[in-house]
Amino acid sequence: MKIFVSVDMEGVSGLTDPEEMRAGGRGYERGCELMTGDANAAIRGAFGAGATSVVVTDSHSSGKNLRADLIDERCTLIRGPYKPMRMGEGLDATFDAAIYIGYHARAGTPDGVLNHTWMGREIRDLYLNGEIAGEIRLMAAYAGSLGVPVALVAGDEAACAEARDVLGDVETVAVKKGCDRYAAELIPPARAQQLIYEGTRRALENLADARPYTVTAPYTLGVDWASTSIARSCAYIPGVTLAGPRMTEFTTGDYEEIVGLLGVWSSIAGEVGCTGLHYG
């Protein structure tokens, strides 16, 4: 059994402050340790359920957050910036399941801890085939386009609720409950990581019941940007249309192009918006 684990940071146990997720910020180094701890819990659960191979990708910001010296030695780790498939880098049709750890709710979700969609300042909302989408829907659809089901999503309560809304009866593990965007009632990391381990093992032991999340092609990605200048700049990419003063759209039959374009748009928006590159 071959398992893919994508690890974001905003939904990691014990974390609530943006500084803890930004390189150089107060608490960042400890945040990386907690992120690695949550990842290791999922890796242990996967191997405990019979996995023979686990590939982990660092899906937050620069992609250099998971501690390579502390990650479970049985996995392989994909890290670094500008990965073509970003949060889905390394995933292909040979995997039996995908697991999403440290994920967060989409932009504007009430009590969603650190809620945003792909880029916290530049994107107001994102749409996939006309349906509002957060990173959970986006990446589940990418896995589904490859025939891979999402077995588990771990993050805050709002992220888990979003996962169930999108994926149905998927296994979820809530490691904190949002009080507002930057505050939460936390489960202490040691206990939260035990819950992730147990949830991962349970999900994979019942993998026969899981089904890929599928979106019917062609795929149309729409982005409601925070500014007209970002929208206009992104619309210069061939195939991208300006659908409104702050809205761009792109349609394709290949979902990899959706994920890849999000990365390109992030780079452009980071330059135009002067806020720096952020994804995941």
Image (spheres, rainbow, N blue to C red):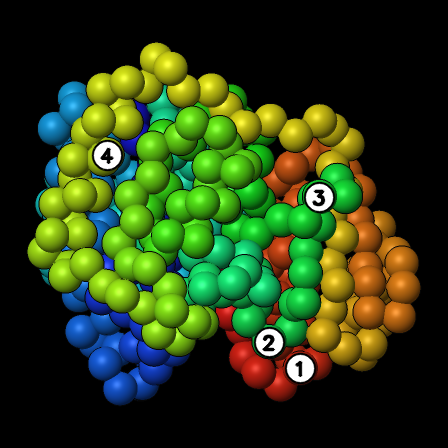
* Residue on which the image places disc 3: 131
**CA gap, disc 4 and disc 3:** 28 Å
Quadrant for residue 210, please give it. Answer: top left
Mark 2 or mark 4: whose residue is earlier in sequence: 2
Q: Foreground mark, 2 or 3?
A: 3
* Residue on which the image places disc 1: 273
- Position in image of residue 265 (x %, y %): 67, 63
**CA gap, disc 2 and disc 4:** 32 Å
**CA gap, disc 4 and disc 1:** 38 Å
Q: Are the residues at dot 2 and dot 1 in contact (C-beta closer than 8 Å)?
A: yes
Residue 21 seen: no
Q: Residue at x 60, y 26 (%)?
A: 214
Which quadrant would the N terminus be assigned to in this image? Answer: top left
In this view of the protein, which residue sits in the foreground, 102 or 146? 102
Mark 2 or mark 3: whose residue is earlier in sequence: 2
Q: Are the residues at dot 2 and dot 3 in contact (C-beta closer than 8 Å)?
A: no
Badge number at residue 200: 4
Compared to residue 19, the image places residue 159 above or below, namely above
Task: Report helix, strand or loop for mark 3.
Answer: strand
